[in-house]
Amino acid sequence: MFFDGRQQSGLPETDYDLIIVGAGPAGITLALELESLGLRIALLESGGQEYDDDAQRLNEGRIEGNDDEYDLQFSRLRWLGGTSNHWGGHCAPLDSIDFERSPGGGLSGWPFGRTELEPYYKKAHDYCELGAYRYNAAELVYGDTSGFLLHDNDKVETTVIRQSPPTRFGEKYSDRLEQSANIHVWFWTNVITVRSDDSGEWAETRTLNGVNRRFKGKAVVLAAGAIENTRIVLFSNQQGGTRLGDEGGLLGKCYMDHPSAGAGFIHFNRPVGDLVYWSDSSAHADEGVPLHFVLRLTEAEIAKRNLLNFQYYLVPFADVPQKVRDRWRAAKTGVTSLKNVAKRLLGRDIPVIGTPRTFSDDYCDFIANADAIAAVQAERIFAQPGHKRVLLRFESEERPHRTNFVALDPSERDALGMPRPVLHWATAEDDLAAIRETVQVFGNIVGAAGIGRVQLEDHDDDPYWGTTTAWHQLGCMRMAESPTSGVVDANCRLHGSNAIYVASGAVFPTSGRANPTLTIVALTLRLADHLSERMQG
């Protein structure tokens, strides 16, 4: 059932069995999974059923560190379905090595192994519309590995990313939520603070038109994304003089993302025809689910050299590297200017970096670089067999570092009166060194195999050409058995609380290389089993 929290009266009582904060992939999955138990469930959503500018502005915050193009306001979305409303749909489980090794720096890793999540990964496939749980690349091409690069090398492997439609969780599951007698979706209802005491778990809420409510439940689950979940608990502790999840001083610490950039070019000794990596994904599918193929070092090689987990997308080019670089930089300038034009038309603020820019500046830059944008897209879509050069575009894990963290801004508050978040985030030098070493190792393998050579990217003042982020907000509320080593326990319960839980990428102790949505949904399904036992026990 749907309710508008902005109404002053005529709404249900706010005593529930379970309170879920955030109606994105995690929140919706959890509510639907527990619906059959007959529990009275409140699903609290910041926005409505469609985009709203005022709700979206609640995401605004500062970034200090790298990547001045990262936009906190639009990296997460506030309406039914959450960030699945602009999710790209790439899915893969975390690798075994992600669960097996410590990240270093005195920090603990995952408190359980990959096998713990296997049944939940399979079930998460249904929610994400991914078909069968199959990721063995050789099996998915029926044993024909002729389209794999270095397929007979024991240091390199080809692996698979499955493509969700992508599932828009709000659209996909809206009817079921609206028709449910047990699930109450409260729109326009923002959680300000949470509290845990002997009488139960509490969530204080506020709407943008000033309606305050207090929700009480047997359990509260924070499913609002890594930064927003962290902000809620930090503010709750500040207001209540508590240290929920912060006995070890790690609340908000160890923010992670997936850096992505062009690492270099493979120059082949002779033209190479079609390989699976750059074929249109519609050419490779498993029972209708499109497949993407990526290249990576084997886990044994990664462990041996203590490298980051990573993956390479291979992008074919027929042009010389300098012209490719210039065209991509021009295209990037054009796209940024187009985004600024759109923001101005919608009345949104444009961050000032260096000399202030006008609408005319952005419009002229977009027009001037439109050809470069079209050329880059054409290269991606119409690249033909017989290539002598491919770009190695990597996506890499980022180790957890205490120096990357989310804090509350003491000088800026949002329309609800909450301090805005500040993200302190800069790529660590040891991570950059590991990325460079990975490229060099791969270059040595390519050379030794006699197929060509790898030209490392000349990165000037940046770690690599075009370094950007995947916008995967991870960490800040890391999982660990001990309250001094993490923020939540192995069941995602906030240390120091009776029954406040977290369902998001915030709980990842390490990030791995894989896009996180599938793992977030799998962890949510595992949490559903735990809550089912707890509430029926």
Image (cartoon, rainbow, N blue to C red):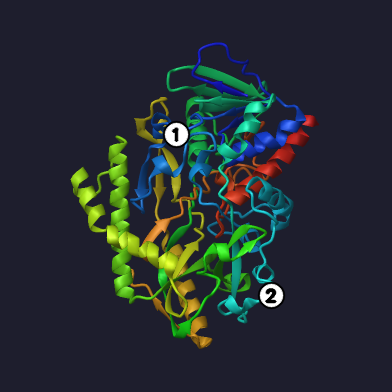
Q: Looking at the rendering, in which quadrant would you find the C terminus? A: top right
Q: Looking at the rendering, in which quadrant would you find the N terminus? A: top right
Q: What x and y, as percent, mark residue 186?
A: 56, 24
Instruction: Return the disc, 2 or 1, that comes first in the chain's sequence.
Output: 1
Q: What x and y, as percent, mark residue 20?
A: 61, 31
Q: What x and y, as percent, mark residue 268?
A: 45, 83
Relative to 20, does residue 4 appear above or below in the rendering? above
Residue at 48% across / 49% down in the picture? 255
Could you say which is closer to the camera, residue 257 or residue 175?
A: 175
Relative to 30, does residue 469 appear above or below in the rendering? below
Q: Amino acid at mark 1?
A: Tyr
Q: Which residue is mark 2?
A: 143
Q: Which residue is mark 1?
A: 51
Regarding residue 292, the answer to whether it shows in the image is no
Label 2: element kind: loop
| In-image side of 372 versus 166 (left or right) | left
